Image (spheres, rainbow, N blue to C red):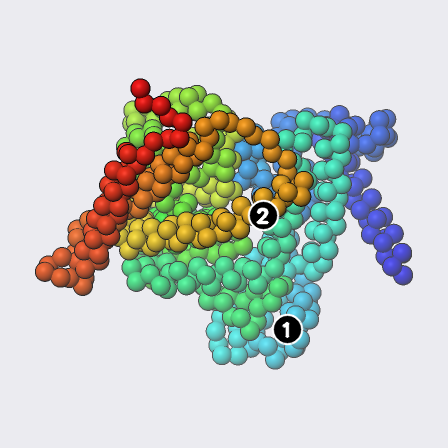
């Protein structure tokens, strides 16, 4: 039985593989197909493509054809193109632009099949689960569709239901993608720099995560938790998740009625001030990035509603961006450095963000950044300012081969989208000016005296742990040398005194760093007027200054002693 199942699977992969090749040939990529299959076979496939179809395909650019190929090959390839649109470090801008246009709107499947999926997942008849279930879907996409239902409690729910067998379809397509990626790497060596198999692997992880509606429900609850914990945010709305009706294939959310945020005419007819709505949306997004570190990565107008109370409500939480606290600080420093034309600050921020902080041609890199800063400073019109900064820096990052976390490009793309929505509502809104207090707050948070002290203590603890483990590491290294696993032959006269001096210098440097930290921390405690106090001075500040004095005395005594020590073999004439 297993043999026949495997044979059937291979046959389906073969059929799908040939279907993909036919679509490529249809849009004029015969040469590409020739690389992927044995020479001469593509002529056979070519005969099945009508001449009228090929002439029709000739009116498109090669990048438009790539988009059309993805749309024709279905949901897996549409999603693949949409995810690749977040990788401007790998793909040309014209192809990115086409992939951003990919649409996955498809006709809904029948209401009876939707009911079957729900009953199979929740293991109860629809009549017992809900007071009512609308058979006609009010929204449909390539992987799921949404039905209105009413709970027995009377609550209105939007029930997102996964398409039947969509997981199997996507898994089969991913197998074919791996085959194509292997062929590309084997027969077209120039594609290896793009790491085709790595791209497919990342896509597989992303889309399988998106197919799990439990993951999306966690995103919604996390987003909701951030809003709930912020007493200053009373303008952002998040749908409630009904966990008891949510599985990996069904997502039950509160049904929220509202007006599409881009429908200015209807907003005005309902008495809304679109400028205020624009400001609410901007503040909500800025907080997501610089305060929560968890932002909506696909904020197009179809995913944002304005409720009857004037709240901004985000929908569809399948694609979210996550930023580490360190990177929030980096983005904050980056924007401030650009605004103040601080070249060193921009370089430092990008190096902190980069996975390879060694830049081969640092001089040319600094020159390119300086050109960007000078052009930016004299520009009179800064519409979509924050996204423009990221996009222009993106070009420099790509040109110099700097590796940055994927969320950099995800943030750049989502900023382009959200700023377009914001400026459609209010072209005069200065997003950078609005963001400045939140950016400053994120930097101030890192300069908190208690946080600095905690970092310093952690640093001392880590250094102490390292010194504790160092003898054991040294013994292991010596043991390997004795066992013949490591061979060392080093002879250098006068090395011992040099090592002795280097050890003393290293000790003084480390002690000086700790001393500086204590002095800065003590000063911050005094400036911030931290309690408890003794004679009007913070007790923590006094403790820090006493420790600093003791360390300073120790350094002074060690230096005096060292001045009288001679290196063995050192001759004074």
| Residue 535 horizontal side relative to residue 473, left or right | left
Disc number lying in front (2 or 1)? 2
User: Picture coordinates of residue 538 (x, y %)?
Assistant: 17, 58
224 with respect to 182 (left or right):
left
Quarter of the image containing the N terminus?
bottom right
Q: Name the residue under label 1.
A: 122
Above or below: residue 498 compared with residue 248: above
Left or right for 60, reference 539: right
Could you tell me if residue 209 is visible in this image?
A: yes
- Residue drawn at x 29%, y 24% as measured from the top left: 378
- In this orientation, which residue lies closer to the viewer: 472 or 63? 472
Q: Where is residue 406 in the image (x, y as percent from the top left)?
A: 52, 42
Residue 555, position as x, y percentages in the image:
27, 42
- Circle 1 Cα neighbour tier, 10 Å, few/some/many (<14 / 14–19 / ≥20): some
Q: Nearer the viewer, residue 573 or 452?
A: 573
Residue at x-position 53% and y-position 63%: 217
Q: Are marks 2 and 1 in contact (CB under 8 Å)?
A: no
Q: In the image, is residue 468 above or below residue 181?
A: below
CA gap, disc 2 and disc 1: 58 Å
Q: Name the residue under label 2.
A: 476
Along the line of sight, which residue is nearer the eye, 447 or 399? 447
Residue 461's mark?
Answer: none
Q: SS at mark 1?
A: helix
Viewport quadrant of the C terminus: top left
Q: How crowded is mark 2: few (under 14 residues within 10 Å), some or many (20 or more)?
A: few
Q: Quadrant of residue 6?
A: bottom right
**Can residue 433 be seen here?**
no
Q: Of the two numbered discs 2 and 1 on the same chain, state the one appearing first in sequence.
A: 1
Which image quadrant is residue 215 in?
bottom right
Q: Is mark 2 on a helix, strand or loop?
A: helix
Task: Give the total of numbered labels.
Answer: 2
Please name the residue shown 40% across and 36% down the image.
500
């Amino acid at each position: 039985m297993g043999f026949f199942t495997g044979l059937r699977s291979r046959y389906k992969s073969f059929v799908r593989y040939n279907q993909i090749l036919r679509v490529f040939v249809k849009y004029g990529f015969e040469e590409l197909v020739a690389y992927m299959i044995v020479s001469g076979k593509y002529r056979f496939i070519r005969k099945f493509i009508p001449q009228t179809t090929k002439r029709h395909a000739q009116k498109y650019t090669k990048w438009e054809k790539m988009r059309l190929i993805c749309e024709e090959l279905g949901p897996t390839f549409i999603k693949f193109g949409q995810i690749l649109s977040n990788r401007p470090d790998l793909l040309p801008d014209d192809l990115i632009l086409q992939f951003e246009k990919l649409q996955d709107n498809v006709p809904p499947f029948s209401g009876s099949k939707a009911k079957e999926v729900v009953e199979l997942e929740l293991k109860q008849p629809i009549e017992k689960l809900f007071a009512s279930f609308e058979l006609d879907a009010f929204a449909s996409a390539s992987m799921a569709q949404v039905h209105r239902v009413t709970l027995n409690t009377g609550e209105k729910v939007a029930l997102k239901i996964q398409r039947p067998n969509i997981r199997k379809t996507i898994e089969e397509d991913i197998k074919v993608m791996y085959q194509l990626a292997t062929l590309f790497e084997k027969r077209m060596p120039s594609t290896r720099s793009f790491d085709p198999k790595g791209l497919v692997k990342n896509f597989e992880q992303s889309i399988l995560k998106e197919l799990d509606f439990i993951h999306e429900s966690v995103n919604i609850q996390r987003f909701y938790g951030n809003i709930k914990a912020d007493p200053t945010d009373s303008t952002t709305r998040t749908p409630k998740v009904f966990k008891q009706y949510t599985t990996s294939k069904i997502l039950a959310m509160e049904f929220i009625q509202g007006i599409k945020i881009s429908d200015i005419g209807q907003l005005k007819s309902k008495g809304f001030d679109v400028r205020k709505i624009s400001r609410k949306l901007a503040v909500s997004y800025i907080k997501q990035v610089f305060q929560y570190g968890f932002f909506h990565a696909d904020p197009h107008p179809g995913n944002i509603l304005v409720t009857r109370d004037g709240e901004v409500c985000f929908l569809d939480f399948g694609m979210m961006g996550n930023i580490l606290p360190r990177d929030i600080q980096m983005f904050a420093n980056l924007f401030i450095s650009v605004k103040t034309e601080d070249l060193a600050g921009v370089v430092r921020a990008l190096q902190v963000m980069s996975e390879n902080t060694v830049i081969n041609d640092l001089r040319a890199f600094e020159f390119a950044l300086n050109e960007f800063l000078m052009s930016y400073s004299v520009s009179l019109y800064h519409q979509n300012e924050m996204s423009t900064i990221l996009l222009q820096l993106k070009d420099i990052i790509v040109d110099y081969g700097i590796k940055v976390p994927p969320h950099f490009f995800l943030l750049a793309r989502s900023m382009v989208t959200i700023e377009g929505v914001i400026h459609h509502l209010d072209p005069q809104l200065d997003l950078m000016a609005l963001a400045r207090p939140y950016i400053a707050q994120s930097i101030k948070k890192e300069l908190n005296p208690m946080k600095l002290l905690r970092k310093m203590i952690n640093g001392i603890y880590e250094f102490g742990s390292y010194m504790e483990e160092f003898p054991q590491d040294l013994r292991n290294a010596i043991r390997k040398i004795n066992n013949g696993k490591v061979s060392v032959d080093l002879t250098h006269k006068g090395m011992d005194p040099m090592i002795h001096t280097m050890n003393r210098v290293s000790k003084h440097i480390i002690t000086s760093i700790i001393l500086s930290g204590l002095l800065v921390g003590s000063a911050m405690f005094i400036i911030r007027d931290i309690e408890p106090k003794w004679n009007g001075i913070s007790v923590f500040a006094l403790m820090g200054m006493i420790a600093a004095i003791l360390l300073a005395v120790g350094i002074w005594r060690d230096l005096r002693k060292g001045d009288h020590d001679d290196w063995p073999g050192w001759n004074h004439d």
